[in-house]
Amino acid sequence: MTEGSPQSPVVPVYTQEYILAKFPPMSTMSASAIITALTNASAEEMTMIRGLLAVPTTPVKAPRVKVPAAPKKALPMPEGEPTAEDYRMAVASIDLSVCVGRDLKGGEDKRFKPIVYRESQCGKAIAEDGLCKVCAKRNAKYEETGKPGPWNGRVTEDPLDSCHMLGTAWAETSKPVFGAGSAAVSEAGSVASAKEVEKTEKAAAK
Ligand SMILES: [Zn+2]
């Protein structure tokens, strides 16, 4: 308490001069002196200091935690000739909490010529309307231009006409032949091509 004026404490004016007087330029202070000064600073002083240092008063946003993509579960490749149904995901196996974009990567069945694909679910974190950022962009472009490009539709819907899948308009036109592809196993049982089938399966299982 200061003598003479016990009931009227001096309210400091938080000017730049005031702060600089109380907190000399940091380059002239030791680290411990800076810490002591900052520790003893009042809330108002800290606000002023933040203003001088242009430190944002709002807490810095924590880095976004990446949602790991669900492990890909490639559909099994049947030994015999698959049907269109075989290469569609079962409704119960579709995870609606992640992107439902149709992914054909790794789903090649090279026993067909031309190659036929089995679908899998994109599975990345949803950005909008059940789709991840990439799929949403592809879908928007498709809707805008009518050209599918890399867009293959949603696994919750039938494949697009252009999808290289069984039962599509593409299949009707291209007529993929089972057993005519590079991974076809001949009736005699080609070791090389059997290996290739195995390789494809392993790659798809990754
Ligand atoms: Zn996606």
Image (cartoon, helix red, strand yellow):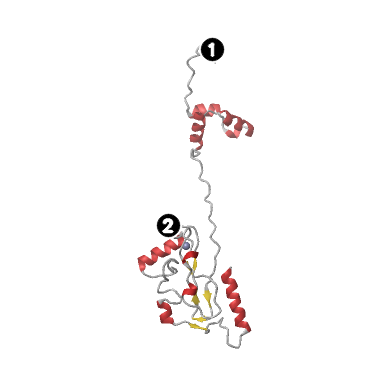
Furthest toward the top, the residue is: 4
Looking at the rendered image, the quarter that the N terminus falls into is top right
> Residue 41 location, x and y as percent?
55, 29
Q: Are marks 2 and 1 in contact (CB under 8 Å)?
A: no
Q: Residue sitting at 36 percent across and 69 percent down?
A: 146
Q: CA distance from mark 2 to mark 1?
A: 67 Å
Q: Give 125 or 9, whichever is nearer the viewer.
A: 125
Q: Give 170 or 97, whichever is nearer the viewer.
A: 97
Q: Nearer the viewer, mark 2 or mark 1?
A: 2
> Residue 138 location, x and y as percent?
42, 64
Tag 2 residue? 128
The vertical placement of 74 against 169, above or below, is above
- Tag 2: residue type? Glu
Q: Residue sitting at 41 percent across and 80 percent down?
A: 172
Classify mark 2 as within 8 Å of ligand 1 or not, answering yes or no. Answer: no
- Say which label, 2 or 1, has the lower sequence index: 1
Looking at the rendered image, the quarter that the C terminus falls into is bottom right
Q: Residues within 10 Å of mark 1 (few under 14, many from 20)?
A: few
Q: Residue sitting at 52 percent across and 75 percent down?
A: 108
Furthest toward the bottom, the residue is: 188
Answer left or right for 61 relative to 172: right
What is the secondary structure assignment of the residue under circle 2? loop
- Tag 1: residue type? Glu
Tag 1 residue? 3
Q: Residue sitting at 45 percent across and 77 percent down?
A: 166
The vertical placement of 62 against 1, above or below, is below
> Residue 14 location, x and y as percent?
48, 27
What is the secondary structure assignment of the residue under circle 1? loop
Classify mark 1 as within 8 Å of ligand 1 or not, answering yes or no. Answer: no
Q: Residues within 10 Å of mark 2 (few under 14, many from 20)?
A: few
